[in-house]
Image: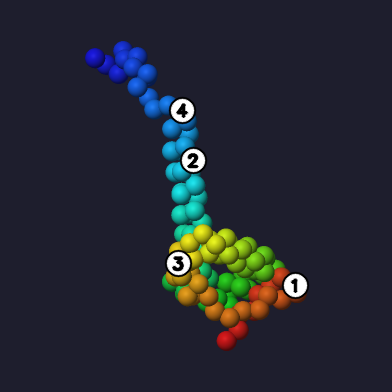
Amino acid sequence: MSILDRDDFDNLPPADKMAAEQLVRMTKNTFDHMVMSFNEGSNIFWGNRMGATPEDIAEELGADAGEVFYLHARLGELISLVKPEAITEGLSLVGNFTVNEDGTVTVTE
């Protein structure tokens, strides 16, 4: 029998079970993506494999650097409330910096 001839959709899981499973998947995928973004963001800035230095990247970000750092830090805080060990890798890369009044960031030793 062709699937085009079947009409056996009564065997689908109940709507509440399907919705619950979808919510669990969405929540886990969102959290996993947040963790990946935090760790990879740290790596892109502090451990760039393409040769850009943190100073170069901060200069290129210009006045947006402060906001990028602020949002990255808030993301890390949220993740650490749930599963702090998930961002150990990213945190281990973060160096010293100062956010200046004009929004720029200065990398310090």
Q: Secondary structure at mark 1?
A: loop
- x and y percent of residue 4 in the render? 32, 16
Task: Name the amino acid, label 3.
Answer: Glu
Most foreground residue, 68 or 26 = 26
List the residue tagged with mark 1.
102
Residue at the disc numbered 4: 15
Which residue: 35% across, 22% down?
Answer: 11
Look at the numbered disc 2 and give the secondary structure of its residue: helix
The colour scheme used to paint the residues is rainbow
Q: Secondary structure at mark 3?
A: helix
Residue with the mark numbered 2 = 23
Position of residue 105 in the picture relative to residue 87 (left or right): right
- Say which of 91 and 67 sits in front: 91
Q: CA distance from mark 4 to mark 1?
A: 52 Å
- The Cα atoms of the two marked residues, 3 and 1, are separated by 33 Å
- Give me the residue at 58% from left, 78% from top: 55
Pinpoint residue 63: horizontal percent, then vertical percent.
70, 68
Residue, disc 3: 85
Kindly indicate whether the residue at mark 2 contacts the one at mark 4 (C-beta within 8 angstroms): no
Q: Residue furthest bottom?
A: 109
Marks 1 and 2, the one that precedes in the sequence:
2
In the rendering, which numbered label is found on residue 90?
none
Q: Nearer the viewer, mark 4 or mark 1?
A: 4
Are the residues tagged 3 and 1 within 8 Å (C-beta)? no
Q: Is residue 77 above or below residue 20?
A: below
